[in-house]
Amino acid sequence: MKPDCLLLKLGELTLKGRNRSRFEKAVLRQIRRVLAPFPDLRYISEFGRVYVELRGVSYEAAAAALGRVFGLASFSPAYTAPLELEAVRELALQIMLALPKRPATFKINARRVNKTFPHDSQQMNYLVGGYVLEGCPGLTVDVHRPEVELRVELREERALLYAESVEGAGGFPAGSSGKALLLLSGGIDSPVAGWLAMRKGLELEMIHFHSYPYTSERAKLKVLDLARQLAGYAESVKMHLVSFTEVQTAIHAAYKENLLVTLMRRAMYRIAGLVAEREGLQALVTGESLGQVASQTLPSLHAIGNVAQLPILQPLMMMDKKEIVRIAERIGTFPISILPYEDCCTLFLPPSPSTNPNLRVVEKIESGMAFLPELIQRAAAQTETLIIRSDQKEEREHHLL
Ligand code: ATP
Ligand code: MG
């Protein structure tokens, strides 16, 4: 059986009044964006839900696209019938018979919108339910906790029936929470952090530090692939590529001990802060997870995060690696992240990075690096900025400065 309609339920039940309608408009815009490749669809929206007539478009293709819409709570494949009792009964039976798993209990939940239909909701529950019971031996009615609830909406022109509900991505629609800068490495974690930030309604720009020629062109392309994958959840994303080579080699020339990683990270966060400020972004988003590596202990987080003026949002902080990997697989970044290209952070690693850096000691070492502020300013000013879209390989490129 092929559904001929989709019923979409928008999310966040806590929103009221004007906020609610703004939220719904923003979600609808995203729905239309991801479904734009299917121009034949027709939309009817009403109170927190949207009906999409498929008009020949494959349900599977539309459903896959809808998984990328934040603010969509759930959607159901739905079937239409003429407004006649016999047609509704027959369709209800066919839907029950075609379910992927045969339920033991069910109930019909009818709703009569069109008051000219001769049977009211209660009567329809009995008339349709009885017919389904006859056609499905072994099935019983459970009005309190049915395994399947088959909804029957008697609308103005047609009846709409649906029994299944697919969970949507949830969250808030793109851009509704403001703008932030994602520090995107080629690893597993930061793309997941970015996706979680986007799901909360943040519009993201991204920044990536490379140490060309120590890191390869392929490593950079891998990060652009990750950004492109994330761009599938927004309209497009801006990517700022920063050459970290000069900063890194200068720091390493002056200091090689166990606080090196802390110093490098502080420089990175300072540059990110400057770029965020220039672009009018309100927070940094990074992929740290407490205790995962030496630079992610509490003393390290303190010594590194201390340089930032803007809030640093770290959505993975309390998550296990397993949970992070599960999300990476779901959003399609995992296979790209595990490709074996080097990251700039693995250059010049000290033999045993400190897990307990002391902020005052770090600041003292830095104050001996008089060259550093200027190098940081320069790296932030010379970013190469690309616009990345999920649907095309080429990026429009322009250089700032
Ligand atoms: P990831 O899997 O995201 O690389 P990680 O577990 O390797 O994270 P770290 O190397 O400590 O952790 O990096 C912590 C965070 O710093 C990353 O999640 C990312 O947000 C940022 N970061 C690290 N390297 C870079 C880079 N080359 N460019 C931009 N951001 C980076
Ligand atoms: Mg990494």
Image (cartoon, helix red, strand yellow):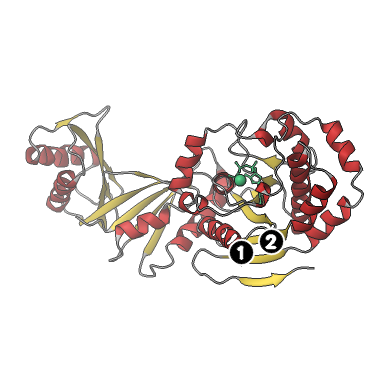
| Above/below status of 288 relative to 62 | above
Name the foreground residue: 152 vs 93: 93
Q: Quadrant of residue 129?
A: top left
- The first of marks 2 and 1 along the sequence is 2
Q: Identify the residue at image location x=70%, y=65%.
A: 384
Quadrant of the image containing the N terminus: bottom left
| Above/below status of 150 relative to 360 | below
The amino acid type, in three-letter code, at marker 1 is: Glu
How many other residues sit within 10 Å of disc 1, few (<14), some (14-19) or many (≥20)?
few
Quadrant of the image containing the C terminus: bottom right
Q: Identify the residue at image location x=68%, y=62%.
A: 213
Q: Secondary structure at mark 2?
A: loop
The residue labelled by disc 1 is 217
The response on whether ligand 1 sits within 8 Å of label 2 is no
Dots 2, 1 in contact, CB < 8 A: yes
Q: Left or right: 54 with respect to 127?
A: right
How many other residues sit within 10 Å of disc 2, few (<14), some (14-19) or many (≥20)?
some
Q: Left or right: 317 with respect to 25?
A: right
Name the foreground residue: 201 vs 306: 306
| The residue positioned farthest toward the front in the image shown | 351
The residue labelled by disc 2 is 212
Q: Identify the residue at image location x=74%, y=51%.
A: 272
Name the foreground residue: 264 vs 332: 264
